[in-house]
Amino acid sequence: MIKIYTTGGTIEGLDYVGDKGIKKSNLSIEDFLKNANVDFDYSIESICKKDSRAIDENDRELLAEKIIGKTIHYINTLKTISP
């Protein structure tokens, strides 16, 4: 089983439109996996629904709590560099 943790953004098919909020417009990881007819079990858990620029220390700690102590392999799909 593959466990996928998401924090919002493109991987969840979300676009952030300034102060206008969130709109669903892109293909999400769940849509992609369903359309790809993958032959493995997976589950998706949303940690938060934030633009990557809005992820803060509390979000990082929550994510760490989910994965620390587990045998995992991971893929980081986005790295945002803050000014």
Image (cartoon, grey):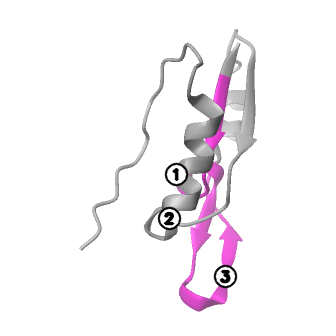
Q: CA distance from mark 2 to mark 3?
A: 18 Å
Residue at 65% over, 47% down: 28
Q: Secondary structure at mark 2?
A: loop
- Residue hosting label 1: 60
Q: What amino acid does circle 2 point to? A: Asp
Q: CA distance from mark 2 to mark 1?
A: 6 Å
Outermost residue on the bottom side: it is 19
Q: What amino acid does circle 1 point to? A: Arg
Outermost residue on the top side: it is 39
Residue at 74% over, 39% down: 45
Q: What amino acid does circle 3 point to? A: Gly
Q: Where are the magenta residues, as a range?
A: 3-27
Other residues around mark 1 within 10 Å, as few (<14) / some (14–19) / many (≥20): few
Using the image, tell me which numbered label, if any, was put on residue 56. Answer: 2
Q: Position of residue 65 (x, y in %)?
A: 62, 38
Q: Position of residue 54 (x, y in %)?
A: 50, 70
Along the line of sight, the residue nearer the viewer: 25 or 17: 17
The answer to whether residue 69 is visible is yes
Image position of 77 (left or right of 51): left
Q: In the rendered view, would you say 11 is above or below 57?
A: above
Q: Are marks 2 and 1 in contact (CB under 8 Å)?
A: yes
- Residue hosting label 3: 21
